[in-house]
Amino acid sequence: MSFTESFETVTGTKIRLMRGGKGAPLLFLHGASGASRWLPFMEKLSETHEVIVPEHPGFGGSDNPEWLDNISDLAFFYLDVLDHLGFDKVNLVGQSIGGWLAAEIAVRNATKLGSLTVVAPAGIRVKGVRKGDVFMWNPEETARNLFHDQAFAEAMLAAPPPSKEGMEILLRNKLTSAKLAWEPRFLNPHLHKWLHRIPVPTLIVWGDDDKAMPVGYAPAWRDLIPNSRLEIIENCGHVPQIEKADRFVELVNGFIAEVTR
Amino acid sequence: MKFYFMHLMPYADLDLSYDEKHNSAWVTLPNTYYDPKKGHQLYNRYLDELEYADQLGFDGICVNEHHSNAYGLMPIPGVMAGALARRTKNVKIAILGRALPLLNNPLTVAEEFAMVDNITGGRLIAGMVRGIGAEYHSWGVNPAFSHERFQEAHDLILQAWTQPGPSVFEGKHYNFEYVNVWPRVYQDNPHPPIWIPSQGSSETIEWAAHPDRKYTYLQTFASVSTVARYMKMYKDVAAGYGYEATEDQLGWSLPLYVAETDEIARREAKEHIEAFLQKFLRMPMEMLLPPGYTSVKSMVGAMSAKAGHAMKQTIDSVIEEGKFICGSPATVREKLEEYQAQIGFGHLLTLLQFGTLPAELTRKNMEIYSREVMPYLRNATSRTAA
């Protein structure tokens, strides 16, 4: 695995980043469980892209700044990050809270975006389609509900208990997720009004057996973002980039190649 | 030492086999388990018990706030305090609640407390809490902002009580152009006594003990060693601020059962205290400690402790730890004298009804306690203070 880890200060806030690969830049925005490790899907994406994976403020090894209160704060901060990175165009990819964040960034300012990929994003509401209450799930329920293929859950549950530092990171990630998403639950009630402003080609990816953010949300995203396409991955839960890494990478690479050539 | 009769008003008619289908008596236990006909009887029985405490010579009675559960039926404790305000004559009425961060408008508490204080001519004790973790699920309030909302709501209420209105309040969570609460508090020099019930937190103690506040810190349901540790911490913090904490600043709340003999007490209390421990208090970690409710540091501690060994609480385990005092009048007096001498608290809040404890046993408990325990300990103070 070839990646480098660094800490960079953006408008006074220090964040941890992992970077690897060469090619068109791809900025991956993680979900509620953070991005402490360089995962196989990142490695695969880095074969064709310069992949940059920051940890959001309040998560993992990044600062927990005073100013962070909500998803809007985080979206504006990432506009600073885009300036800081200095690329002309970036392919923005985000999953779950990260997908929500990516959409919030894109409605604010998409001038530095080449494309947008949102994977099982939070952020909107489809009445009657209830999101999973991830804050009520215990560790076993979390593992079981995140994946369709229970072998992934078993592997997660069989992992040795985290160290004290690992536990602290887990709790920090959960705390910041709560800050962003507890109430209203994984929702910005105003986001849906502005998704039409996303001007870049958008790929929406969803697992067909997502118990956290049900696939019933997928058509709403497709309908709200003008230049968008929906891909549903079969036999897959909330984290396609892990559970169906090959398919996920294939979809993202194919989409980016098509829309940015 | 001062004596208070504390009530939780549990739904004592709860079908205790609920736990075959549900993992908690909180948040998600369907309210179809509640029968309003039985609830009507229970509310009136419990209010009678609180009124009886006034006649038996208790110094105060305490009502409590919890939401969406079978553990305590007082989501709006001011209703109970209002009912008791007119039917009691001498006792202090402590409202322990209110859970400030749950409220979108904390001025409702400034008003509610001021009304009770006016009706009773100054018998109100104003409790301020954050609520327990489960409440953040039930009320959909973000626990990540629990601490800052508590501080801000407290500041707002204090401003409403102590600054002539109208005044302006500029906060992060709360903003008012006209803070001007009518009625003003009856106890206006400077405001009604404020009690801070807590499950134990050094941050809370440092805040409550600050010379600007000197609020009474109330340790709820904890082992004697925990109570001793936190009360010593309060005294040390006060000393650090350059003053000596009085016993009036320290209170302890716990269930207690006294009967004719040790053997009778244990036999009569067992089923009911175990229902309290195993059924009414039952909730998973995710409900009890939502993210942000406690600091990440305390959470790491709590999770490691849980990983160690989660023991089922029984009558013997809680008696052993001193979380529950149970026995003959002599036994109860002896224990309380010992703890008081050791720890030095000025307010003892006893839960003389708990879990499914029925009316007759509750009354007997109250009578024996008030007759054979309270009078012997009125003048007790700690050895260190003497």
Image: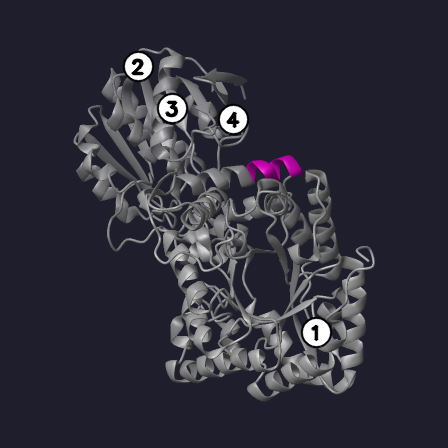
Q: Assess whether mark 3 and mark 1 are in contact (beta carbons under 8 angstroms).
A: no
- Taking A138 as reference, is A192 above or below it? above
Q: Assess whether mark 1 and mark 2 are in contact (beta carbons under 8 angstroms).
A: no
Q: Residues within 10 Å of mark 4 (few under 14, many from 20)?
A: some
Amino acid identity at mark 1: Ile
| Residue B344, x across and y down, in percent | 75, 59
Q: Which residue is mark 3?
A: A77
Check the residue under mark 2 and report the chain it is in: A
Query: From the image, which quarter does the N terminus of chain B lie in?
Result: bottom right
Q: CA distance from mark 4 to mark 2?
A: 24 Å
Q: Residues within 10 Å of mark 1 (few under 14, many from 20)?
A: many
Answer left or right for B19 relative to B228. Answer: left
Amino acid identity at mark 2: Lys
Mark identifier at residue A62: 4
Q: Earlier in the sequence, mark 3 or mark 4?
A: 4
Circle 1 sits in a helix, a strand or a loop, which is it? helix
Q: Assess whether mark 4 and mark 3 are in contact (beta carbons under 8 angstroms).
A: no
Q: Same chain, marks 2 and 1?
A: no
* Dominant secondary structure, magenta: helix
Q: Which residue is mark 2?
A: A89
Q: CA distance from mark 2 to mark 3?
A: 17 Å
* Stretch of the chain drawn in magenta: A164-170
